[in-house]
Every structure is written in C-alpha cells, then in structure tokens.
C-alpha cells in the first residue's frame, strides 16, 4: 500500500469514469428459480485518462514524472492515490452514529443514497460529534479514532479532501511522439481498489 499521489499535468484530458457493480453469483434451480448473491458490497470505478501532451524538457519533465510514477508503483503491483477532479471533497458528511462504546469508525461519503468507504483521506480534515468540533486521529486507510467513544445517538460528521485508492489495469503505458519535445499518452487506465 502506497501513499503516492498520481501526478496531474496541464495536458490531461477529462477523466472518463465508469461504475463497475460488484460481481453477482447466480444459481438457477431445475425449476428455473434464480438465487443471487453479491460477492462484495462496494462498487469499483474504472478511470481512463488521456494526456494530449507530456513535455520531456529538463525543466518540466512531465513524461519522466509519469513514467517514474508508473515504475515506482510497479505497474499493476502497488496501489496509490488519485484525486478525482469531480469527486474529492466532503462537506459536513455523515459517516457514523455513536453508540457510547465504539471509538473507531471508517471514513466514508454518501453518493445519492449510497454510503461508501473512503480509503484515502486527505489532510486538514475536520470532525464534529453531535455538532461540536472534535479532534480525532485518522489512519492512512481512513480509520477515524476519537479519544473517547462518542455518546449513543451522536452524529459523526467530517469535512475535507479525499483521494481514491487505485491500481493500474495494465502492465504497460503507451506513448507516441507528437512533436520533438512532446509525447502523447492516449489512454491511461486504472481502477479503484479496496485495500487489504
């Protein structure tokens, strides 16, 4: 598990994002009744980015930075953090209800009516317990621990930036030369992952 953040460059095109539902196991009886079970409860997101230009000059070195990042995480080997330009900030987000006993909760955010965990918290997060500012420690995987267990029924809320924990989907990055000082990467694909 890495805490490296995917680099952003001026030549990056809009990120295409697809939602991949959790796998479903289907069993069919001889009478053709179907029984379905989900193998996971959280979807994954598949991203596809393009880079219209990556400069190779010593001063800018965008190509070298992207290749260095890819090599550092070992292609598909290690996970890393990606800040989605449209999905990266929580504001007064409900992530738990106190029970008077539990002091550690998983950070998360709601999209529509679906709550999903956040495994890449950013810096400068703020927390409230029952509407009152409260300090907490946050692990690299989004485990929030309060000094004392929040009271039963107390709403736990947070605000701040977050990242998506991702992994490359291929062992190669393909580049084409567009000008003598520019390279282009038409498709860089990766997907979100649930950490071990």
Image (spheres, rainbow, N blue to C red):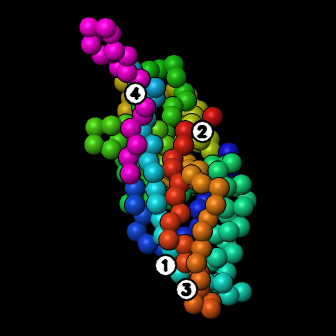
Q: CA distance from mark 3 to mark 2?
A: 37 Å
The tag on residue 41 is none
Q: Quick check: marks 3 and 2 in contact, CB under 8 Å?
A: no
Q: Position of residue 68 (x, y in %)?
A: 71, 67
- Tell me which residue sits at (28%, 43%) in the image: 112
Q: CA distance from mark 4 to mark 3?
A: 43 Å
Q: Residue furthest front?
A: 30
Q: CA distance from mark 1 to mark 3?
A: 9 Å
Horizontally, residue 134 falls left or right of residue 141, namely: left
Q: Which residue is mark 2?
A: 195
Are there few (<14), some (14-19), or many (20+) residues within 10 Å of tag 1?
A: some
Q: Is residue 42 above or below residue 25?
A: below
Q: Earlier in the sequence, mark 2 or mark 1?
A: 1
Question: Observer-nearest residue: 83 or 105?
Answer: 83
Q: Is residue 151 above or below residue 77?
A: above
Q: Which residue is mark 3?
A: 178
Q: Which residue is mark 4?
A: 24
Are there few (<14), some (14-19), or many (20+) residues within 10 Å of tag 2?
A: few
């Amino acid at each position: 598990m890495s805490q490296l953040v995917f680099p952003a460059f001026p030549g990056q095109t809009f990120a295409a994002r697809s939602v991949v539902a959790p796998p479903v196991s289907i069993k069919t009886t001889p009478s053709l009744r179907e029984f379905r079970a989900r193998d996971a409860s959280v979807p994954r997101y598949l991203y596809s980015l393009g880079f219209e230009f990556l400069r190779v000059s010593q001063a800018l070195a965008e190509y070298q930075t992207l290749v260095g990042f890819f090599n550092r995480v070992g292609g598909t080997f290690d996970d890393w953090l990606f800040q989605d330009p449209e999905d990266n900030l929580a504001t007064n987000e409900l992530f738990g209800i106190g029970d008077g006993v539990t002091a550690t909760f998983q950070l998360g955010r709601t999209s529509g009516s679906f709550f999903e965990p956040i495994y890449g918290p950013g810096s400068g997060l703020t927390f409230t317990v029952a509407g009152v500012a409260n300090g907490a420690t946050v692990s690299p995987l989004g485990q929030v621990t309060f000094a004392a267990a929040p009271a039963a029924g107390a709403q736990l809320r947070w605000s701040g930036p977050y990242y998506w924990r991702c992994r490359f989907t291929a062992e190669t990055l393909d580049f084409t030369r567009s000008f003598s000082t520019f390279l282009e990467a038409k498709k860089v694909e990766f997907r979100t992952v649930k950490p071990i």
